[in-house]
Image: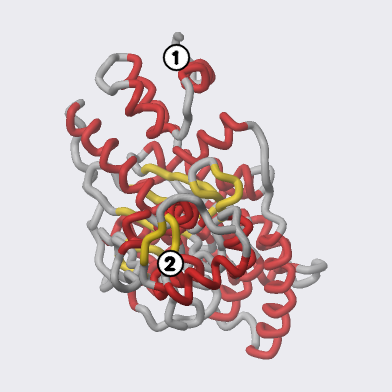
């Protein structure tokens, strides 16, 4: 129904753009904006809309209200390099959800960098220390040694979740922030789509940051972690959504894929283990459990090492891919808020903000949004769980 607040004239194309950028139909937007579909059709035909409706449209479409007053639809762009590609297809414009988590991570990185500089921390010498000309095996070995990433450690992990936790802890100890989330902030209705991006890297000599889309399968998250870590070593900031098992043409992504695969499944050990397992049922699954990677990564590594014929590789790959996508679609939800929020923030960042706030160097007003919480009570519980006196 029409609103009683004053009406204004906006550009119909901008109003339609706001709706389409979040994939809403006219009926969907009408429901969210508490009006009728005919009213939405009217906005997009003649631009006549009330001021109150403008605010509701902005909220429903996650669009800054000022954008709705523009003379033409703006172009959403990433603030970092767009490495996204699936089989080399041109990526679509970034969604509001991707833009939101990228902006949030950047703000947290800016704060953390300033915090480290203030306490006298030294820059990290490995950020930007390699180039794509370096042999993949050499790059993988440097990264493996610096961060203490070993096949043996992962093989002893109870499961993929434990292996991912162990690798993140090792990487965080070396000064890299690692944040994992499948939603925007704490809004469980704003899901991050794996089809759009799997992760991103924000290179910085003091506070390098890796973000992982936690709606992805656990084995895929481990691969993304090391893929983005390689971007950090290259000194590159960018968003990725590559298929780790299919050759791509982008040089940086191909290099990061190859290095991540070599760290996870060293070529020097694969052939011998493959021969040992030939008599076992589903030897690919055995290797996947040993290396704590997906079957897709194992299959690609076997094919690249000439241990599988093309027809065999494609048959196995097709079956594994179907199972992989089914598991990814069932990515876990819920859980303990404090544990989940700790994963979203990364323990080094979480501890730094709480410590700074308790010491009075950061105001509580600034600390709460950095931590993604709204009340002092929640802040105190978060601090207590990390061992701070409250």
Say left or right for 318 vs 255: right
297 or 372, which is in the foreground? 372
* Residue for point 33% across, 67% down: 77
* Residue for point 68% across, 43% down: 158
Residue 48 has which mark? 2
What is the x, y in percent for residue 309?
65, 88
Task: Please identify the quadrant where the N terminus is shown.
Answer: bottom right
Residue 235 has which mark? none
The answer for how far apart the CA atoms under marks 1 and 2 are is: 55 Å
Say if 129 sits above or below 384 in the image: below
* Residue for point 37% across, 54% down: 65
Residue 388 has which mark? 1
Quarter where residue 222 is shown: bottom right
Query: Circles 1 and 2: CB distance less than 8 Å?
Result: no
Q: Is residue 149 visible?
A: yes
Task: Please identify the quadrant where the C terminus is shown.
Answer: top left
Say left or right for 123 vs 290: left
Q: Is residue 352 visible?
A: no
Q: Secondary structure at mark 1?
A: loop
Say if 212 sits above or below 342 in the image: below
What is the x, y in percent for residue 99?
40, 58
* Residue for point 46% across, 48% down: 149
What is the x, y in percent for residue 235?
25, 58
| Sequence-wise first label, 1 or 2 | 2
What is the x, y in percent for residue 263?
47, 59
Comparing labels 1 and 2, the label whose residue is closer to the camera: 2
Report crowding for label 2: few under 14, some 14 to 19, many 20 or more residues within 10 A (C-alpha): some
277 or 339, which is in the foreground? 339
Say left or right for 257 vs 233: right
Say if 385 sits above or below 275 in the image: above
272 or 301, which is in the foreground? 301
Q: Secondary structure at mark 2?
A: strand
């Amino acid at each position: 129904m029409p609103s009683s607040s004053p009406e204004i004239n906006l550009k119909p194309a901008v109003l339609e753009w706001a709706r389409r950028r979040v994939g809403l139909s006219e009926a969907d937007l009408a429901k969210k904006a508490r009006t009728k579909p005919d009213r939405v059709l009217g906005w997009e035909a003649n631009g006549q809309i009330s001021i109150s409706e403008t605010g509701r449209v902005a909220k429903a479409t996650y669009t800054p209200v000022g954008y709705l007053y523009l003379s033409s639809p703006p172009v959403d762009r990433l603030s970092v390099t767009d490495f996204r590609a699936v089989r080399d297809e041109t990526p679509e414009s970034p969604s509001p959800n991707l833009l939101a988590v990228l902006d949030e991570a950047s703000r947290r990185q800016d704060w953390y960098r300033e915090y480290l500089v203030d306490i006298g921390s030294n820059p990290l010498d490995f950020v930007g220390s390699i180039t794509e000309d370096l042999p993949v095996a050499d790059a993988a070995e440097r990264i493996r040694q610096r961060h203490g990433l070993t096949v043996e450690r992962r093989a002893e992990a109870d499961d993929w979740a434990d292996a991912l936790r162990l690798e993140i802890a090792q990487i965080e100890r070396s000064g890299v922030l690692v944040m994992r989330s499948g939603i925007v902030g704490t809004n469980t209705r704003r899901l991050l789509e794996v089809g759009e991006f799997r992760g991103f890297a924000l290179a910085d000599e003091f506070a390098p940051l890796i973000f992982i889309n936690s709606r992805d399968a656990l084995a895929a998250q481990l691969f993304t972690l090391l893929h983005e870590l390689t971007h950090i070593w290259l000194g590159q900031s960018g968003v990725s959504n590559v298929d780790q098992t299919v050759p791509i043409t982008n040089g940086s992504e191909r290099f990061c894929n190859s290095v991540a695969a070599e760290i996870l499944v060293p070529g020097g050990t694969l052939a011998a283990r493959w021969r040992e397992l030939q008599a076992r049922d589903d030897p690919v699954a055995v290797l996947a459990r040993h290396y704590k990677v997906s079957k897709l990564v194992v299959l690609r590594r076997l094919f690249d090492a000439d241990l599988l014929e093309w027809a065999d590789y494609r048959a196995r790959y097709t079956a594994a891919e179907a199972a992989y996508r089914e598991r990814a679609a069932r990515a876990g939800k819920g859980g303990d808020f404090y544990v989940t929020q700790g994963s979203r923030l990364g323990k080094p960042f979480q501890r730094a903000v709480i410590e700074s706030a308790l010491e009075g160097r950061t105001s509580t007003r600034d600390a709460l949004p950095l931590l993604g919480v709204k009340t002092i009570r929640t802040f105190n519980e978060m601090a207590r769980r990390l061992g701070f006196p409250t």
